[in-house]
Amino acid sequence: MDLALPDVATQFAAAADRAFSGAGGVELARRAEVDPALRLREIKVVLDALGVPDLDPRADLDSSIMAAELVRVAGRYIIPFPVVAYVAARPEDGVPVALASAAPLRVDHGDLFGNWVLHDLEGGASEATPATARLGSRLAPFTTDMARRGDPGSTPVGEVELLCVLWASYLLGVSEYALELAVDHVKGRVQFGRPLSDLQSVRFQVADATVAVDGLRELIHFTLWRLSADPSNSFTDALAARLQAQEVAQPVLRLSQQLHGAAGMCDEYDISFLVRHVQPALRLPVDSDALSDILFNRISTHGFATLFPLRAADVATPE
């Protein structure tokens, strides 16, 4: 497996970065809280101009990598739009596709589209519509309760896997930017006559976070390859990538906010918006604790194809 990204994906990511930064970057999240309509009026226009409706991440490996790079860049700017669902939209009609919790049934930015296709981690699928207006909480300003419509169905092979990896890539982008914010802050913040970056404890924490983010990036690239090479046997890989993304993003965000001190809680600083707006991505359809249980049960039943394969019998059941 070659972990180097194809040129087309690198160029697409660069184009997305220019488009998002040109539209306002993180400032879009600030403005969207005041004017939610800009999500369709401005952000959807940017995505359409990038050709997202014509990008099918299910088509081939290059397309899935391009989609993952797009959502990674969106994560860096905490773009207030259901980018993953829009990228993974059903090819035949453009209906957005999302992972959703079983109860309550919720989707971030669910109010933007009248029809959705929702998948759960147990293999169930259903169509849904927004049930209420946005919840409007500070930690999830655009999360929407949904109502199922019609009879439930089953999820096609590869759908949940794709969504898990795309969300992992989104959290990678969030983690990358949070780490960059932390590095910039400790380099510029002077306390007791010297920059915070001179403190060995700070350097160790930043180094650990850097290793974690770099490792997540490689895991996502590997998992995308696995989804392409063996789509019918990559569900465990996708769950593992999603869980690792959650377990990397949470401490990196916490570290960045801590290193900012009290300023990390103020919306004048980008890290505050990253922490607030990323909460649905960290908690839907399930949080890391629940997902770790699901992953453990999956490995216990089916094993895990790694460099050192695990059989189901090798996984001890906790007492």
Image: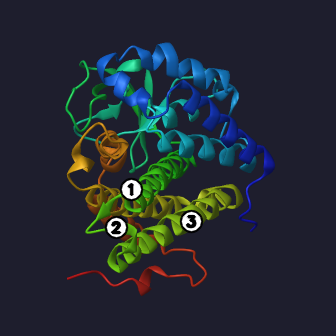
User: On the image, numbered disc 2 is attached to which residue?
Assistant: 196
Mark 2 residue type: Leu
Q: Earlier in the sequence, mark 1 or mark 3?
A: 1
Q: Quadrant of the N terminus?
A: bottom right
Q: Nearer the viewer, mark 2 or mark 3?
A: 2
Mark 1 residue type: His
Q: Secondary structure at mark 2?
A: helix
User: On the image, numbered disc 1 is attached to which residue?
Assistant: 185
| Residue 152 can be seen, yes or no | yes
Tally of numbered tags:
3
Q: Secondary structure at mark 3?
A: helix
Calculate the distance from the C-alpha at mark 2 to the C-alpha at mark 1: 8 Å
Task: Verify CB contact (< 8 Å) between mark 2 and mark 1.
Answer: yes
Calculate the distance from the C-alpha at mark 1 to the C-alpha at mark 3: 28 Å
Label 1: few (<14), some (14–19) or many (≥20) C-alpha neighbours in 10 Å: some
Residue 219's tag is 3
Q: Is residue 250 left or right of residue 173?
A: left
Mark 3 residue type: Leu
At horizontal 32% and vertical 62% (from top left) the residue drawn is 190
Q: Nearer the viewer, mark 1 or mark 3?
A: 1
Q: Secondary structure at mark 1?
A: helix
The picture quadrant where one finds residue 54 is top right
Which residue is at the far right?
7
Q: Looking at the picture, how far across and down is residue 96, in whole percent? A: 50, 27
